Image: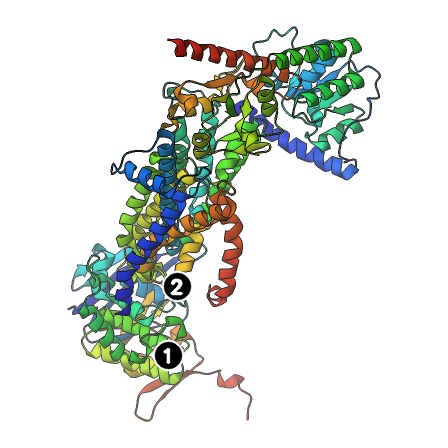
Amino acid sequence: MVNQLVARDVCFAYANGPRVLHDVNLELARGELVSLVGPNGSGKSTLLRAIAGLVELDRGDVLLDGRPLRAASPRERALDVAVVPQFLPSLFDVRVEDFVLGGRYARIDRWVGPKSSDREAIESSLAACDAIECRGRAMSELSGGQRQRVVVARAVAQEAAVLLVDEPTTSLDPDHQVTIFELLARLASEGRIVLVVTHELNLAAQFSTALAVLHEGRLVARGSVDALMRREVLSSVYGERLHFGRTDDGCPFVVPRARLARRPQG
Amino acid sequence: MTVRTRVLSAPLWYGLLLTGLMAGSVMLGSSALAAGEVLEGSLAMLGLSEPLERSAQAIVELRVWRALCTLGVGASLALSGGLIQGLFRNALASPSLIGVTGGASLGAAFAILIVGGYAPRLVLESSVGLDALLVPLFSFVMALCTTALVAWIASARGRASVTTLLLVGIAVNMCVAGAFAAIQYLTLEEWEISRAILAWTFGTLDDRSGFHCLTVFGGLAVSTLAVPFVARELDLLKGGEEDAEALGVDVAATKRVALVAAALAASAAVAVAGQIAFVGLVVPHLLRLCGQHSYRQLLWHALPAGAAFLLGADVLQRWLFGAGALQPGVMMSVVGGPFFLFLLVRSRREVSTW
Amino acid sequence: MYVLPQLRALERLARACSLLALGLAAGACSRVEHAPAPSVARPERIVAASATAVDVAVAVAGLERMAGVPSQALEYSVLHAGRPEPRPIVRFDAYLAESLLALRPDLVVIDPWQAPETSAQLRAAGVSVFALPIVRDFPDARAALVSAGAAFGDPELTARALADFDRRTRALRERRSERGWRGLAYSNFGGAGSTAGRETTIDALFELVGIRNLMAERGTVGHAGITFEDLLALDPDVILVSEPLRMGEGPSGDRGGAAERLLRSEVSLAGLRAVREDRIVALPAWLFATGSQELVSAAEELERRVEQLARRLAQQGSQ
């Protein structure tokens, strides 16, 4: 069980490219669902991959309860950290069980193969993600919402303490977006660390325990939803064309909006 | 549970199929031998019976070596094709992509030049009897060297992405093909040698000996050892390298092992039989059509299926057209193209998702 | 390596391509069949473009009128290394218009299969081109002498060459062996074995010295592949191979001889009668490959070596 994930002074640049991450420091605790937000190209996905250990850092460390992640082999790392990727190929020849079984890779002995405990983990994670009806079908046959739930189910089957989720709601309708965030919030409340990269500020505001704002490779703010869903914080990052408000139950929201001056009078 | 019963009965079916094809293959030849003689001669090879009259015994042995070589070559090419397709995440990939075929051609051409007396004989002068082994030896070594060169150049700047590997493979193939073409052109006037080089490129399973068998099964055995280490990993690679790595796959090691195993199996096969196209491409494809999508099953099935495919095609064409009518490499090229086209048209759904 | 100096050939390839393009553009490309009689009454600078053409041209026109020969003629023609060379002869490496025009020939003698584009170029440049007929047997070889002699030969030399050919051929036929040995030709450079069937010069040689060509009897026409199983099944009394080619110059050492080495070393062939009893007969490479009236020399040499073999076998038998 992992209680704390710390990214310390994380710097990263692509080979022969500009620096993408500048001294990022971020702490996540068990039970938290932190949404990482920021404009396009701010380095959100790169930071997620850096935390997942999928890119070689120029400087800095990612620590799980004080242990540096870079010392671990991919297999050891997968026991603690699961990733829900934004894009996957269509996987037309992969069946849903086989796909979810992929999450158990680090736990399956090469010479023994999947055991009954692995089968149970597949069942229970599919059930936990409301995707049990997808069992027996090919990945390419699923609808967008089903597919996203199955991808999350694979990460759940991995039984890792840290869940790193990259834009899980792109191409989903509003109802399915809510379903996914509900699922992520539940997973966090069960004792995981969940970090979600997202553009859905309003969903993030409803479900996150905290927000982290990334701008031009730097972490510019980290704090509670109430503290960060404000014009003073977000306009410096997203620009002025935002409208802020609160829902009936008092949850802050923000919607894109052209400046009033430019609107035709009517 | 149906999967498990199918897996259990598969070895039985494959065993029956291969035994039948072996029997058919040793019965076919340019000289007439009775089934009893062939059986007796084969048993004599195992020391279970008195050998036949000398030349009849030699003929039976040649046929047995030929059949065994065909099995080994088919299995090796199919396994290698499966591994390469997994590695490149593309069902159109084949061992020739990483330079195996080109390198082997060049090696064979060098060996033929040496046998033909074009190179100073040095050591070879004193080692009469090496001639027959020289062509497989050279093509094997050159095939492996070419693949190593491809892998080395592709990974010269840190991690080798599959795309880099593919591009470097194409470039190195072009270089090797250029050298091969130069040799072919320069020996154009020496028609005996041009003929020998050209004949090699068509692939042959004639006149094989125990040495050839040892080569192909040696390569195959080592490559097969790699299967448990890459099968599940190749399945996970379908989602991309980064996704696989996030799931705990050591992607770099997987690529290395799969590449070495594929190169070894294909090199040994090509060294023994010359260029035989399409087996590596079509057999994994056929297995997918039969529902074997997971590399955990596909790679194991590729061994007997590839063996049966090549031996079956060889037996069929020799039965239809007589011994020596068409070399298996030529036949595979003639039949393989239209057959592959047919497969593609049938599975258009797959094509559209690339 | 012998190949390296030949890398110049790549350069020549490029030149050939450009010449070819020129030729096509000029529209001067017409296939050369039998050439009309040369325009020069008595050509004094003759270039022979193949080993066969060298044999024929030297026989009917004499060495003095030869202005150039291909390099391979020094291996595969009457001019082959080891024969006295009365005077240095200019050599060229490939049948390309530029190389040949540099020799300022007034007649070029070619084999019928040689590049028609080059021949067209030569004729466009005002050089006569004479194509020999295809030679598959002794009458063909004689016909080639006759037609070449009529076209550009010295009547006296031609008559002498024909008389010599006829006399030696007749003599061979008269003393043809009645042993009825069953034989076949074999060559193998480590790829696949090949042999000669009907309508080949090898078949004509076998016929003239009284050896039955097993491949011809089997119905094989022309040159064809042959497997170890075929060899074992036919089990010939004698196998004809090519001797290694001893080069007169260069570090290349001997070329060829591969078939004999293979026959003697291959385990599965150890049971062959020809291997067991040492009945492998090797012809010098230039005679094994000849396609001219020198077939008669090849037949004489084959006969001599077969008789040697027969004597040795008889001695072994009497011991």
Q: Is residue B152 visible?
A: no
Q: Nearer the viewer, residue B131 or B123?
A: B131
Q: How is the image coloured?
A: rainbow
Q: Is residue C96 visible?
A: yes
Mark 1 or 2, which is nearer the eye? Answer: 2
The residues bearing labels 1 and 2 have C-alpha atoms spaced at a distance of: 30 Å
The quadrant where residue B284 appears: bottom left
Amino acid type assigned to the residue bearing label 2 in the image: Cys
Q: On the rendered image, what quadrant is the C terminus of chain C found in? A: top left
To the question of a shared chain for discs 1 and 2, the answer is: no
The quadrant where residue A197 appears: bottom left
Q: Chain of mark 2?
A: B
Q: Is residue B149 above or below residue C85?
A: below
Q: Chain of mark 1?
A: A
Crowding near pointer 2: few (<14 within 10 Å), some, many (20+)?
few
Instruction: Tell how many labels.
Output: 2
> Residue A75: horizontal and vertical position, in percent?
23, 59
Crowding near pointer 1: few (<14 within 10 Å), some, many (20+)?
many
Asked whether, in this view, residue B9 is left or right of residue B327, the answer is: left
Helix, strand or loop status at disc 1? helix
Helix, strand or loop status at disc 2? loop
Amino acid type assigned to the residue bearing label 1 in the image: Gly
Residue A145 numbered tag: 1
> Residue B66: horizontal and vertical position, in percent?
39, 40
Q: Are marks 1 and 2 in contact (CB under 8 Å)?
A: no
Asked whether, in this view, residue B4 is left or right of residue C217, the answer is: left
> Residue C290: horizontal and vertical position, in percent?
61, 20
Q: Nearer the viewer, residue C152 or B21?
A: B21
Identify the residue under disc 2. Answer: B290
> Residue A35: horizontal and vertical position, in percent?
30, 75
